[in-house]
């Protein structure tokens, strides 16, 4: 059972976090933003940023009310999201886009690939799209699914720059178990569903399109014992 976990399949570690000092994390964040900011040099000035009023409103779709929400994505598989109190509408929309795609990827796993809504939240030309596709297809290739509870918490947006943003969230997969596609748990569970590897920091770089929607373009992660990952340990 060597198929990589979500943390490894989505991307390489955040700025090689195991070997760089904490001060380098700022540079990593800048790279995320520069990679995901849409070029504006040739756009010229357009009132409202070139977006229709409806699109502007869509770009500020807030996350759910602060508190914990449990979402059933497939029989026996739920996602538990702890929504933060984020008053800024742009940052709140970035958080929602990040959490929605996390949820949609597990929905794809739980439905044996029948639900492909995760593709709507990722830029199809980005590395994040191929990372997510590879991860989901890995379950299907191995005839596997999942049951249990995946947790997403400590959601935040540490940086916004123009049409680019970074979103961070802690992930806890200790409540998830691999199963066959009929839902029977596998006798041997992989190490990436056990501590310390099952608790990590997931980071995404997002870009805002002309329609106002935030799409994920880049994934990174920090795994234990990286200092940023330690923040996710409860």
Image: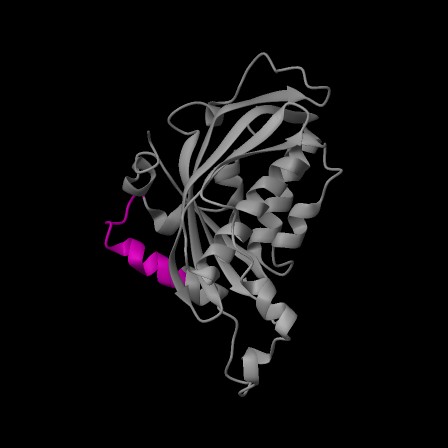
2 w.r.t. 104: above or below: above
Asked if residue 84 lies left or right of residue 50, the reply is: left
The stretch drawn in magenta includes residue 196: no
What's the image's color scheme? one colour
Q: Quadrant of residue 18?
A: top left
- Residue in front for this viewpoint, 3 or 109: 109
Tell me what residue is drawn at x 54 percent, y 58 percent.
Answer: 217
Residue at the far bottom in the pictured view: 44
Range of magenta residues: 18-31
Left or right side of 129 for 88: left
Q: Inspect this view and state whether residue 32 appears.
A: yes
Q: Nearer the viewer, residue 148 or 63?
A: 63
Rendered location of residue 79, percent (x, y): 55, 33
Please provide percent x and percent y for residue 209.
59, 68
Residue, far right: 114
For this orientation, the residue located farthest to the top is 187
Q: Quadrant of residue 66?
A: top left
Residue 169 in the image, given as x and y percentages of width and height = 42, 44
Classify 98 as above or below 152.
Answer: below
Q: Quadrant of the N terminus?
A: top right
Q: Classify 186 as above or below 218.
A: above
Residue 108 in percent (x, y) is at 67, 38
Residue 134 lies in quadrant: top right
User: Which residue is painted at 69% across and 47% down in the image?
Assistant: 117
Residue 20 among magenta residues = yes
């Amino acid at each position: 059972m060597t198929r990589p976990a979500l943390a490894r399949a989505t991307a390489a570690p955040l700025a090689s976090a195991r070997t760089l000092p904490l001060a380098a994390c700022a540079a990593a964040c800048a790279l995320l933003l520069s990679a995901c900011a849409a070029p504006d040099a040739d756009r010229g000035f357009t009132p409202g940023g070139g977006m229709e009023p409806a699109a502007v409103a869509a770009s500020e779709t807030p996350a759910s009310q602060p508190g914990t929400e449990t979402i059933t994505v497939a029989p026996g598989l739920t996602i538990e999201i702890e929504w933060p109190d984020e008053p800024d509408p742009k940052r709140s929309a970035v958080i929602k886009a990040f959490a929605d795609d996390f949820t949609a990827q597990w929905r794809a796993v739980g439905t044996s690939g029948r639900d492909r809504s995760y593709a709507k939240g990722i830029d199809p030309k980005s590395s994040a799209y191929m990372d997510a596709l590879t991860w989901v297809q890995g379950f299907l290739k191995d005839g596997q699914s999942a049951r249990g509870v995946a947790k997403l918490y400590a959601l935040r947006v540490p940086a916004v720059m123009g049409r680019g943003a970074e979103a961070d969230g802690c992930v806890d997969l200790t409540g998830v178990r691999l199963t066959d596609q009929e839902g029977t748990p596998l006798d041997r569970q992989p190490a990436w569903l056990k501590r310390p590897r099952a608790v990590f920091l997931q980071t995404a770089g997002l870009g805002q399109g002309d329609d106002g929607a935030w799409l994920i373009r880049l994934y990174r992660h920090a795994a234990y014992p990286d200092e940023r990952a330690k923040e996710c340990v409860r």
